Image (cartoon, rainbow, N blue to C red):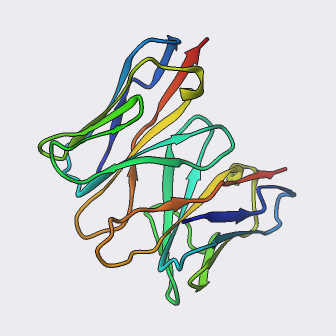
Amino acid sequence: TQLLEQSPQFLSIQEGENLTVYCNSSSVFSSLQWYRQEPGEGPVLLVTVVTGGEVKKLKRLTFQFGDARKDSSLHITAAQPGDTGLYLCAGTTSGTYKYIFGTGTRLKVLA
Amino acid sequence: GAVVSQHPSRVICKSGTSVKIECRSLDFQATTMFWYRQFPKQSLMLMATSNEGSKATYEQGVEKDKFLINHASLTLSTLTVTSAHPEDSSFYICSASPRLAGLTDTQYFGPGTRLTVL
């Protein structure tokens, strides 16, 4: 069974702090997506990474795909209360369009 | 672009009844649609993959006779929870993929449907 483990599971920080969320697997993924989900809503796509070692930036968010395409990280600089939510990574393996979702990281940013 | 809608957003039903949830791609044709289930404070679990005009492929452990999926057109898939029981209460989310050649396998997610079975 392919698993995507996210860490930490929960994170509560003060506004202005930096944080990193990790997404790890023993499987190789052809692409990996990061989503943010708010309560009662569907996940919203933040980024897709497809190349090993790829780094993408989205304002204060920096995403990195591991060289071996087995892991990824999301770094948030100067977190704001609006960043609060459930962060999910999801990977796809070669030959399939199915997503395997990570275990999720629940972030709370306190004002 | 790439908007996916779900209807209803919330539904409460009595135990033993059936409930139908619709998933529509509003501005693109979705060759493939996916149905997920999400329990409180947990991640999404894939239930089934449906391709337009063919039978859905269910994940291991998902009862195909209980969760009926129909993907009759390129913009509509439906999930029917038959003979619902309280343990079927959950947040059901669909996603749609255009799966056009040359594009990444991006899925666009609907807003979800909260099902509560009394």
Residue B89 appears in view: yes
Find residue B12 and report its image quarter.
bottom right
Name the residue rendered at 60%, 50% in the picture: A42
Q: Measured from the top left, where is residue B69 in percent x and y?
A: 60, 76
Vertical order, B73 against A75 (above or below): below
Foreground of the two, B103 or A71: B103
| Relative height, residue A70 to residue A79 (above, below) | below
Q: Is residue B65 left or right of residue A88?
A: right
Single out the residue that lies furthest toward the left: A68
Question: For the view shown, which residue lies furthest in the front direction?
Answer: A59
Q: Residue furthest bottom?
A: B53
**Quadrant in which the C terminus of chain A appears:** top right
Query: In the rendered image, which quarter is residue B93 located in?
Result: bottom right
B4 with respect to A107 (left or right): right
Count of labels in the image: 0
Above-or-below relation of B7 to B91 = below
The x, y position of residue B68, in whole percent, is 63, 75
Residue A100: where, in percent of width, then height?
A: 37, 53
Q: Is residue B117 above or below residue A66?
A: below
Q: Position of residue B18 (x, y in %)?
A: 79, 69
* Residue found 56% across the figure and 73% down from its top: B64
Nearer to us in this view, A26 or A80: A80
Asked whether the viewer can see residue A1, the reply is no
Question: Going 56% across and 84% down the picture, which residue do you hit?
Answer: B74
Q: Is residue A67 left or right of residue B72?
A: left
Left or right placement of residue A26 versus residue B65 in this view: left
